[in-house]
Amino acid sequence: MAAVVPRKPPIPHPREGGFVMPLALGVSMLMLLSSLSLQTVALQGHFDQVSQAGRGRDEDALVGVAQRLVGELNLRHACLLALPLSRWAHEGQSCASLPQQEALVGEAGSFGGRLLAWSPGAMEAEALIEAEPAVHGGIARRAVFKVVLHSDPLRAQSPRLLGLRGVAP
């Protein structure tokens, strides 16, 4: 009987084997890109929340200044309600002690501002108010308000915010 000689396995051709490494690299690259996308979405959501909270604070502060303005006008300067801001200096002196625009708006709590425009109509007026820049780190915020006017006696109702204007956060 002849001795059995073990056969050597055939040498694989360089192009035939090794599919595991490229597959592993592809899967890991896909996982990396997926995790980066999820992180980007999470960071964008956080940024939106912070921005919206800041906008809410701006709106609240400006509403406070607008309410103080309407209260001051009703209490001491009702005759100015029918006049646009540009005519307050001339025609407003005959009906009220003319307030300075900054003094009229004054401060609401720790928040200050000033009246930039007052445009009355038959039944309502539009007011443009600016917050003091120091409150927002040197950035002035503005908002437009609609104010309902009543004629007998002439008085203004609480302001309604129409929107922020000017510098975006």
Image (tube, rainbow, N blue to C red):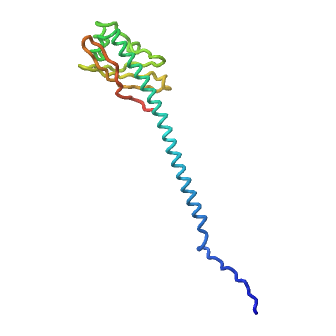
In-image side of 130 versus 43 (left or right): left
Mark count: 0
Residue 123: x, y in percent? 25, 20
Q: Is residue 68 above or below residue 167?
A: above
- The residue depicted at 38 percent of the width and 15 percent of the height is 101
In-image side of 1 versus 139 (left or right): right
In-image side of 75 versus 135 (left or right): left
Residue farthest along the front direction in this orientation: 1
Q: Which quadrant does the C terminus fall into?
A: top left
Residue 35: x, y in percent? 54, 50
Q: Is residue 146 above or below residue 83?
A: below
Q: Which is more toward the observer, 135 or 110?
A: 110
Residue farthest along the bottom direction in this orientation: 1
Answer with the quarter of the image where residue 121 lies: top left
Residue 139: x, y in percent? 46, 27
- The residue depicted at 37 percent of the width and 12 percent of the height is 72
Q: Which is more toward the observer, 112 or 24?
A: 24
Answer with the quarter of the image where residue 115 lies: top left
In-image side of 56 versus 91 (left or right): right
Q: Which quadrant does the N terminus fall into?
A: bottom right
- The residue depicted at 47 percent of the width and 16 percent of the height is 109
